[in-house]
């Protein structure tokens, strides 16, 4: 199975990064897994020019989003990891998601599993987590993709999350949901 993990966190030593690297390690047994730090890429927002709809689905903005979209096309499963930024996903990850527009017709014909992993500083009852998960649920529904897991964690200080009880077991369960072939 080809699994793409999109890390939407600019903190290279933060909790989102640590969790996604742990998931990569769990998933690598028998799978091809790539973690793509979208914050290291040159990305731009969609400018609604519709050129992608006239040229085979390729964004004409001078950035690296087309390469990311091609990786998503090749993947069997995509895991989205993001910190909470003002009740939403990080801007860097949102730029990638907005470029889905360029391939939405093709994406709708592909069976993909997705997972969503969100880390924020607030308690898990805060609505910010629900808002992010709901957005990804709507995206999956629109594209006819299968949500495999959607999880939230509360942690702020780097390294804090992986020290919490039960996190590793939760990550193992999420990874099992991604690779489970139904």
Image (cartoon, rainbow, N blue to C red):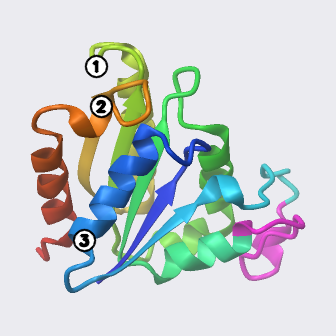
**Magenta highlight range:** 50-65
Tell whether 47 sits left or right of 53.
Answer: right
In the depicted structure, whether residue 120 falls above or below residue 74? above
**Mark linked to residue 27:** 3
Mark 3 Cα shell of 10 Å, populated few (<14), some (14-19), many (≥20): many
Q: Which mark is residue 124?
A: 1
Assess whether residue 54 is covered by the magenta stretch: yes
Kindly identify the residue that appears in the image at 71 percent across and 76 percent down: 57
Q: Earlier in the sequence, mark 2 or mark 1?
A: 1
- Which tag, 3 or 1, sits closer to the chain's start? 3
Cα gap from disc 2 to disc 1, whole angstroms:
7 Å
Q: Which residue is mark 2?
A: 153
At 13% across and 64% down in the image, what residue appears? 176
Between disc 3 and disc 1, the foreground one is 3
> Would you say the residues marked 2 and 1 are in contact, meaning their CB atoms lie under 8 Å apart?
yes
Where's the N terminus, which quadrant?
bottom left
Q: Secondary structure at mark 2?
A: strand
């Amino acid at each position: 199975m080809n699994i793409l993990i999109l890390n939407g966190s600019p903190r290279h030593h933060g909790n989102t990064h640590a969790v996604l690297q742990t998931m990569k390690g769990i998933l690598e047994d028998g799978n091809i897994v790539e973690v793509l730090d979208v914050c290291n890429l040159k990305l731009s927002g969609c400018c609604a020019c519709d050129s992608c709809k006239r040229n085979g689905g390729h964004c004409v903005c001078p950035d690296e989003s087309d390469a990311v979209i091609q990786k998503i096309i090749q993947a069997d499963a995509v895991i989205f990891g993001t910190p909470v930024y003002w009740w939403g996903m990080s801007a860097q990850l949102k730029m990638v998601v907005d470029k889905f527009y360029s391939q939405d017709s093709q994406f709708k014909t592909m069976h993909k599993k997705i997972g969503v992993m969100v880390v924020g500083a607030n308690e898990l009852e805060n609505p910010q987590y629900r808002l992010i998960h709901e957005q990804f649920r709507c995206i999956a529904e629109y594209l006819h993709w299968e949500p495999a897991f959607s999880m939230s964690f509360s942690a702020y200080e780097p390294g804090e999350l992986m020290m919490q009880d039960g996190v590793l077991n939760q990550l193992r369960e999420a990874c099992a949901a991604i690779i489970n072939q139904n």
